[in-house]
Image (cartoon, rainbow, N blue to C red):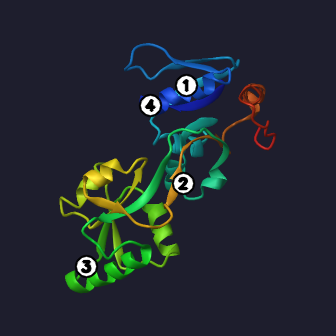
Amino acid sequence: MGLKIGVPSKGRLMEQCFDWFGARGVVMRRTGNEREYSGAIDGVEGAAMVLLSAGEIPRELAAGRIHLGVTGTDLVRETLADWRAAVLELAEMGFGHADLIIAVPEAWVDVETLDDLDAAAAAFRAAHGFRLRIATKYHRLVRDYLRAHGVADYQLVDSQGATEGTIRNLTAEAVADITSTGATLRANHLKILNAPPVLRSQATLFAARSADWAPVRAAASALMARLGLPDDAGLW
């Protein structure tokens, strides 16, 4: 199948990915009907497109089943424990921007910073007998971030969708989620803490360190030339 490039399989992220490559002379297109996960690439001989969900791409890169992949920085760093050992970051692509933030109810007038959150968490545990719950699907990133900022007395509860609604549903007291505008948070009467984001994410082109590059060196070099990126002999 040649040089395998993992691309998000649907939505705005796929369209922007196609636009990014197309502007650099690498034309990507879907083939078949909308329900078929198949596509083609023109402009680089020996390159093939693999349509995957953005969440699958980090694991496929880490396993070496695809050579290159486009996905969010957040997904790579959350999914892969030692992401630098698994993938090489080739290019930030300038779309798919979002911040991973921590938000609390607007009614918490005394909680504006991480220090305030730490104090509120201690008070919550003393009052209720269990730790303050933060709903998120980004367990690794949020845990490392809160540890680095000295926040304790909390627990992470898993939320794979509609995270902003967990507070209204009484399954969490705070949330850690991706946002680009903050509109959904405000609609659910939440406010973002006055602190640096856990992570600033965007769509990024990654290369798999464990992939078999020997048979696809020529295609990889040709693609890098088209994209205006360094031809990294360390991989191929």
Q: State the CA–CA distance, disc 4 to disc 1.
A: 10 Å
Q: The residue under label 2 is which amino acid type?
A: Arg
Dot 1 and dot 3 residues touching (CB under 8 Å): no
Q: Secondary structure at mark 4?
A: helix
Q: Which residue is mark 3?
A: 130
Image vertical order of residue 94 relative to residue 127, above or below: above
- Give the structural element (helix, strand or loop) at label 3: loop
Residue carrying label 1: 18
Query: Which residue shows up at 42% across the image and 73% down it?
Result: 113
Q: Where residue 119 appears, x then y in whole percent?
A: 36, 82
- Residue 186 position within the rendered picture, expressed as x and y whole percent measured from the top left: 30, 54
Q: Residue at x 75, y 35 (%)?
A: 229
- Sequence order check, earlier mark of 3 and 4: 4
Which callout, 1 or 3, points at the residue further toward the start of the chain? 1
To which residue does mark 2 refer?
Answer: 77
Q: Are marks 2 and 3 in contact (CB under 8 Å)?
A: no
At 26% from the left edge and 65% from the top edge, which residue is drawn? 172
Apparent side of residue 69 relative to residue 234 in the rendered image (left or right): left
- Mark 1: secondary structure: helix
Image quadrant in which you'd find residue 167? bottom left
Q: CA distance from mark 3 to mark 4?
A: 41 Å
How far apart are the two marked residues, 1 and 3, measured between alpha carbons?
Answer: 48 Å
Q: Amino acid at mark 4?
A: Arg
Q: Are circles 2 and 1 on residues that touch, CB within 8 Å? A: no
**Badge 4 is on which residue?**
12
Judge by depth and name the residue closer to the eye, 230 or 197: 197
Q: Nearer the viewer, mark 2 or mark 4?
A: 4
Q: Residue furthest left?
A: 169
The picture places residue 134, in percent across and down from the top left corner, at 33, 66
Upstream in the sequence, badge 2 or badge 4? 4
Q: Which residue lies most toward the top here?
A: 32
Compared with 118, 97 (above or below) is above
